[in-house]
Amino acid sequence: MHNNIKAYLVGGGIGSLAAAAFMIRDGHLSGSNISILEAAPIMGGSLDGAGDAFNGYSLRGGRMLTTDNYECTWDLFKSIPSLNVKDTSVFEETIAFNEKHVANSMARLVDRRRAKVPVESMGFSMQDRSELLTLSNADEETLAASRITDWLSPEFFETEFWYMWSTTFAFQPWHSAVEFKRYLHRFMMEFSRIETLAGVKRTIYNQYDSLVCPLQNWLSSQGVNFVMNCTVIDFDHQSEDGKFVVTGIHCRRQDKNEFIEVADGDLVFFQNGSMTDASSLGSMGSAPAKLTKLDSNGWSLWEKLAAGRPQFGNPAAFNSSIAQSFWESFTVTLKDPAFFNQMEQFSGNEAGTGGLVTFKDSNWLMSIVLAHQPHFPSQPAGIQVFWGYALYPDRIGNFVAKPMADCNGEEILRELCGHLRFDLDAVATANCIPCRMPYITSMFMPRLTSDRPLPVPAGSKNFAFVSQFVEIPDDVVFTVEYSIRAAQMAVYQLLDIEREVPPIAQHDHSIKVQFDALLKSFK
C-alpha cells in the first residue's frame, strides 16, 4: 500500500491520465493524493475534439486503433466504465461497435482521373522488395539517425504500398528509418490488409469523447485533482546519494506564481515535448497562423532539464525543423447530406466503414475519412462531420494555386472537390476549420536512441517522463498506445508494482503473418 504518497503529473494528456489510473488501480494510491497540472483549460492534450454545430467542430488528429496491438491501452480501458452503456467497459463498448461497423475500404487510393486505384498489388519491383527487406532486418544501431530515403530508392515512394502505408501512419520520406522499421514489425499483420484497413478499429465517437472523457470521469470519481490553466515553469531538484530527486514544482496560475513542495516519497511525472504544441486554427475565411517555437510552451521545460543531463534526452533532435515535422489537418461540419451521399456513392462505403481515402496525385497528398455519424455526442441530427489531412501543405495545390498552409477553409474545400470532381454545391453549407501543427510528426524525426529518455531515467529517484518522446524498445510512437505504455512502465517502476506490464505482441514472429506479408509483397 502507498497511502501516504502524493503524485504530481505535469501535463494533462492521455499519458498522465493513464498514469493516474494505473496508480489507483494497481498501486492502490488514493485518488485524492494525485494532482494533474495542465496549462490548458481542458484535459486530453493532443487527444482532443471540440466545437459545436453552429461554430463548427474541430479535431486536430485522427487516430488508428487496433485490438491486435495496443496491449496497454486495452488493459487500461477494460477497467474504465463506458459513459454510454451501463455496466460496460470502454473496451467492451469499442469491440461491440466494431463488430457492428466493420472496416472494409473500397476506395483507399484515388488517382487524378477520380478513378479508384487497384490496390491488390503493392507495386513493388524486385529492387523495392530487396531494399525493404534490408531495412526491416537492419538493427537500430546500424540504422542510427538515418532517414527512410537513405535505405529506399526514389521509385519505392511511387508504389501503392508507400501511398497507403505513409498516409495511414503519417510517414514522410525524410523521417526516421528506425521508426519506419519499427512500424513494419509492429504492424506486420496490417501489411496484408493495408488496402482495406480491415485491422483498424474505431471508437463510437471521436477519441476525446470516447477515451478521454470516460477516463477523466472515472478519475474524478476516485478523487483525482484536476488543476487546469496551470503552467509548470520549473522544477526544484537535488541529488541524494547520486539520485536525481524533484523537491518542488514552480507553476503559474491565474497570473500568479505558485510553488508546490514535493515531499520525500512523493512522485513527479512529466509529459516532455508536445506534438501539437504551437498548433493554430483557421476558418472558412482565414488560414491558420504560422506559429513557431517562439510561440511554444511545450519544449522549454524539457530543454531546461536536459541541459547537461544526457540521460534526460535531447529535445533538439525533435523540435529543430518545423519544415520537416509539420502538416495540416481540417475538420468539416456539414448541414446537409449532399457531400456524404456523393462520397458514399463514389466510394462504395457507408460512413464509418471506409477509412482513409487518399488522393495519390494530390500535390498536398490529401486524405479524408468519413466517420460513423454522429462523431460527437452533442452533434444534432442532420449535421455531419468529416476529417482530413495533407502531408505536404507547403506545396502548391492542383486546383488552388497556393500552398495549403496559406489556404483558408473555403480554398481547402475547393481543392478537395476538384480531386473528387464534385460540384461545389456539395459543400455549400460546409464549415471547414483548418489546423496547422508545426510539430505533429516531430517524434518521427531522425534520432539516436540516446535522444529519448527512458520513462524512468537512470539515476532518477522520484521522477519519470511520460510522453511520445521516451524510449520504449520495439514499440511505435505516434500512437495512443505509446503514451499509455510509457505511463504504465513509469508507474510500475516507481511504485515497485509486481504486476507485469503487458508485453508487446510479437506478431512479426508469427509464421502465418510473415507468410501473408511475403505473399502480399509479390502481388
Image (spheres, rainbow, N blue to C red):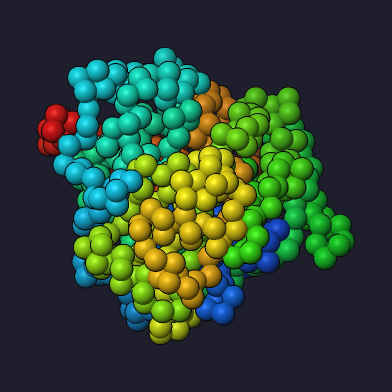
Look at 30% across and 68% down and name the residue there.
342
* Most foreground residue, 291 or 277: 291
Q: Quadrant of residue 512?
A: top left
Query: Given the current orientation, which residue lies at the most extreme right position?
Result: 256
What is the x, y in percent for residue 247? 76, 45
- Residue drawn 73% across and 25% down? 308
Q: Position of residue 40 (x, y in %)?
A: 68, 61
Looking at the image, is 331 positioned above or below residue 65?
Answer: below
Q: Residue furthest top?
A: 142
Q: Is residue 20 left or right of residue 476?
A: right
Residue 2 visible: no
Q: Position of residue 191 (x, y in %)?
A: 23, 39
Front in this rendered view, residue 404 or 481: 404
The residue located at (68%, 66%) in the rendering is 41
Location of residue 332 with respect to 108 vertically, above or below: below
Residue 519 located left or right of residue 286: left
Q: Residue at x 25, y 54 (%)?
A: 107
